[in-house]
Image (cartoon, helix red, strand yellow):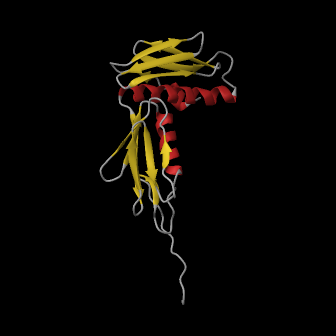
Amino acid sequence: MSRIGKQPVSVPSGVTVEVNETSNSINVSGPKGKLSYTWHEMINVKQEDKDLVCSVREGLDANRTARAQWGTTRSRIQNMVTGVKDGYSKQLKIVGVGWNAKDQGRQIQLNVGYCHPVNLSPPDGVEFSIEQNGNIIVSGPDKHAVGQFAAIIRDQRRPEPYNGKGIMYHDEVIIRKQGKIFGA
């Protein structure tokens, strides 16, 4: 039995949920945006009052894939409900002399030690903002899209352990290494 899958997903006020059991899809809309998801055919999702309940279809209780998809489906729906109500955000910081980020309309321009600037466009529904101290905040209702765009920004110049330079998450800890020691 899935411990996560058994828990119902409560739908707060201000969030609208439309469950279509024939096409195995759900649409969730709220103040931050609208999201949709199509779940695995081995799973049932039903709306009971203000809760969404996920379960495994009849006769598939012993199927390992069905049990795995049960918890995954419930988590994805919970993330959608939380995302359209509150939203998600990731904060990145740029560490390096002369390294910065600029807002170029719908693109972000990174100057991180290359001979050319790197321009990145966020996916639909994802927004970014750049603070005065050079921190980048990526936000949006879709948890996966926000995390993926933040990872793409971080991959442009990953933090390195010797000098501590790079683009890193705000709460990320880089374990520093000692360089070569001459004349020891």
Is 113 positioned to the left or the right of 63 in the image? Answer: left
Considering every residue shown, the one lying at the far front of the view is 116
Q: Nearer the viewer, residue 3 or 141?
A: 141
Q: Residue at 48%, 51% (x, y): give it.
A: 117
What residue appears at the point 47 percent right and 13 percent down from the top-left corner? 18
Q: Which quarter of the figure is the N terminus placed in?
A: top right
Count of numbered circles on the image: 0
Q: Residue furthest bottom?
A: 183
Q: Position of residue 156 (x, y in %)?
A: 52, 51
Above or below, comparing residue 135 to residue 161 in the picture: above
Q: Can you see residue 170?
A: no
Does 67 sit above or below residue 43? Answer: below
**Nearest the eye: 178 or 108:** 108
Q: Percent position (x, y) of residue 16?
A: 40, 16
Q: Please name whichever residue, 96 or 21, is drawn nearer the observer in this view of the structure.
A: 96
- Residue 144 in the image: state x and y as whole percent: 51, 35
In this orientation, does residue 42 appear? Answer: yes
Name the residue at 46% across, 26% down: 80
Q: Work out which quarter of the rendered image holds the C terminus and state it.
A: bottom right
Taking depth in this image into account, of 96 and 85 the one nearest to the observer is 96
| Rendered location of residue 63, percent (x, y) | 70, 26
Q: Left or right: where does residue 65 sit relative to residue 5?
A: right
